[in-house]
Amino acid sequence: MKPARVVFLLDVDNTLLDNDRIVADLKTHLTASFGVERQENYWKIFESLRDELGYADYLGALQRCRIESPHDADYGEVSQFLLEYPFAARLFPLALEVIDHLKQWGSVAILSDGDVVFQPHKVRCAGLQRAVAGRVLIYIHKEHELRFVEAAFPAEHYVLIDDKLRILAAVKASWGARLTTVFPRQGHYAADPENLKQYPPADLTVARIGDLLGCDLSDLLPRDGAPPRTLT
């Protein structure tokens, strides 16, 4: 396969999709269904499971909660809430328009972390799978799977758009000048001052994903010796 000139790789949670709002809605629903104490216990189990597996597993945490109370019918109702959640309504403003904007210069693909069931479901229901013509890769730790990304989407240059500076820095360390990193400052990771201090700035920082509609291709390709920029 001949490499494309440019491939744009977009993260999902808090990059294209307002995952913080989804989590807030889930907390509200869990509290209404189970009460505050059991809602808090769900998130303790969720965090423990994330430490164990390396990714967020919302349905897996619910299953572990069920083991503690195997006769509680409310768990089925909460799983239905998750599966029927209106993910498309939680896309950030202009997210789909940005995908279309980038398509004029190269291929656009989703590159996400997550579990093998709920994350693909979320991507599909949000309309993102269709928006990128099925070009979706979901790994446990995507920064460790770059050779598979290159095999799936060979390119002379990549543009990675992600709300986590940690991910951007890790992929930059591997791909170097072949990569432009773009940091939309959305969500709790992007707002964490410790994250901002711990990792180097992205090549391009924007306040929100929709700001990329104001970019042309020259803004997203490498500039020799150019310092990191913030789009205002």
Image (tube, rainbow, N blue to C red):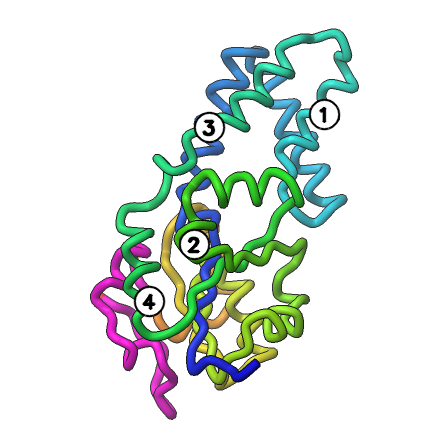
| Residue highlighted by disc 2 | 190
Disc 2 element: helix
Pointer 1 residue: 63
> Mark 1 to mark 3: distance in Å?
18 Å
Q: Secondary structure at mark 4?
A: helix
Q: Is residue 54 left or right of residue 84?
A: right
Identify whether 143 is placed above or below 132.
below
What amino acid is labelled 4 in the image? Leu
- Quarter in which the C terminus is drawn: bottom left
For residue 160, say whether it is visible. yes
Q: Earlier in the sequence, mark 1 or mark 4?
A: 1
Q: Name the residue tied to disc 3.
A: 85
Q: Give the Cα distance between marks 4 and 2.
A: 22 Å
Q: Is residue 201 visible?
A: no
| For marks 4 and 2 on the same chain, the one whose residue lies earlier in the sequence | 4
Q: Residue at x 35, y 35 (%)?
A: 89
The residue stretch that appears in magenta: 205-231
Q: Is residue 114 left or right of residue 216?
A: right
The image quadrant that residue 38 belongs to is: top right
Which quadrant of the structure image shows residue 77? top right
Q: Are marks 1 and 2 in contact (CB under 8 Å)?
A: no
* Mark sitting on residue 86: none
Q: Amino acid at mark 3?
A: Tyr
Q: Is residue 101 above or below residue 75?
A: below
Secondary structure beneath label 1 = helix
